[in-house]
Structures are given as structure tokens and as C-alpha cells.
Amino acid sequence: MNPDSRLLTTRRSLHGVAELVLAGPQHAYTGEISLRSVPGGFATTHSPSLSVVGTEVLGLAGAVGINGHTPASLASALGLEATSLSAVYTDGSGVGRDDSLEVDATAAATIAEAFAAGDAALRSLAPQETPILWPEHFDVGISAGEVNYGVSAGDGYLAVPYAYVGPWSPPAQDDYWNAPFGRAVPVDEIGDADAVLAFFTDGRQRLGGS
């Protein structure tokens, strides 16, 4: 799957919203930055209750469309203040409070579907773990048996949504372990949640897990 400009722009904008409009205010209220996958998008795990579904942010004040806003104006429309997480981590989306946001509905659905498939697969892989959608790298994942499993919306390594298996001590790269951190394959090449689960399970078995 070759990314087009709509996917890249949408991913960057949604990543910025995840950080500055959802996780940032949540951290200011509760000290928590964790988000979660929900149908059609992602949401906070603590107060304030906010979710991104498609091209809108839903909050107590109602639904606000993302397009045409900056993180600062979007948060203000929701009765919040856009809040940076720079004191928590140094990496991230690179989106500023006053940057313009643009979200394409089809691209947003691609990202949401990838997160949903990953979340469902992770819950089947390790029922005792709760998948977290982390605002820093904009991925949903867990750690189990010193291995990271998850689905990323895409990043500088691979621009499209991808599933990954990342051992804390990565094996040498070969035909299977194709990434510096382990294995990564575009979700579009894998398939649905059952196929993503099979991807995770295969990686775990190759690492000696059951």
C-alpha cells in the first residue's frame, strides 16, 4: 500500500489531535496520557471524556469537526485548552498548537480500522493485557513476555498503518525479522483482526513463546 498525501496529512493531523486535544488535557486533569481504540477512531481513557470518530471530536459540548481548525481552536471549541506533552516525552507528531488540521474521511477510516483490528487481535493474543493507544508514537499496543506487539498508524519507518512484533532484544534482521526493532508488515497486506492475530502469534512462536 503506497501512501497518498491524504493519508499522510490525515495521520499527522489525527496524531496532533490525539496529543494536544485528547491526551494533553487528560494528562493535565489526571496525569495519564493513555488513549484507547474505539469504533471509528480513538478516545481518552480518563477525564475529560473525548473521542475522535471519523473527522469529528466528540465531547461534552457536542461534536466539532476537525477540518478548518488548529489544535488550539479545536480544543477551545470543546471547552478545553490544547496542551503539549513535551514535558512527558520528546518525540511525537510535531504538530503545534496553531498548525492547520486536515482530515480526509476515507484516510481516517483506514487508520481507525487498523487500530480496531490491532486492538481486537491484542485482546485475543493476551487477554490479561489492556491495549493502550499511545499518543507519542500513535500506535495501539501491549508488552507481553518482553515483546512489544501492536499496530501503528504509520511513522517515519513505514508510512502506512502496520502491525509489528518488537522483541526487547531484537534478532538480527533477515527475511522474517525485517525491521530494526523486529518485524513490521502493512496492515493492508495482512487483513482483518484474525489475520493480525495470526501475525502476532507467528512472531511469538518464533521467539519461543506459546
Image: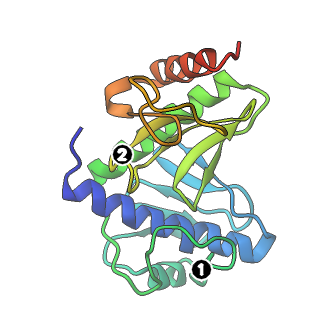
Measured as percent of width and height from the top left, residue 96 is found at 45, 82
Left or right: residue 106 versus residue 146 is left
Measured as percent of width and height from the top left, residue 83 is found at 61, 81
Measured as percent of width and height from the top left, residue 11 is found at 37, 58
The residue located at (73%, 77%) in the rendering is 28
Query: Is residue 147 or residue 177 the one in the foreground?
Result: 177
Query: Residues under labels 2 and 1: Cα distance?
Result: 26 Å
Left or right: residue 27 versus residue 187 is right
Query: Is residue 170 or residue 58 the one in the foreground?
Result: 170
Residue 108 in sight in this render: yes
From this view, report whether residue 200 is shown above or below residue 99: above
Nearer to us of marks 2 and 1 is 1
The residue tagged 1 is 84
Residue 39 in sight in this render: no
Quadrant where the image shows the N terminus: top left
Question: Looking at the rendering, which quadrant does residue 10 occupy?
Answer: bottom left
Q: Mark 1: few, some, or many residues within 10 Å (few <14, many ≥20)?
A: many
Question: Looking at the rendering, which quadrant does residue 168 occupy?
Answer: top right
The residue tagged 2 is 109
Query: SS at mark 2?
Result: helix
Residue found at the very far front of the displayed protein? 172
Quadrant where the image shows the C terminus: top right
Measured as percent of width and height from the top left, residue 178 is found at 41, 32
The residue located at (36%, 45%) in the rendering is 109
Query: SS at mark 1?
Result: loop
Q: Amino acid at mark 2?
A: Ala
Identify the mark nearer the N-term, 2 or 1: 1
From this view, report whether residue 173 is shown above or below residue 57: above
The residue located at (47%, 84%) in the rendering is 97
Query: Is residue 50 or residue 132 the one in the foreground?
Result: 132
Q: Amino acid at mark 1?
A: Ser
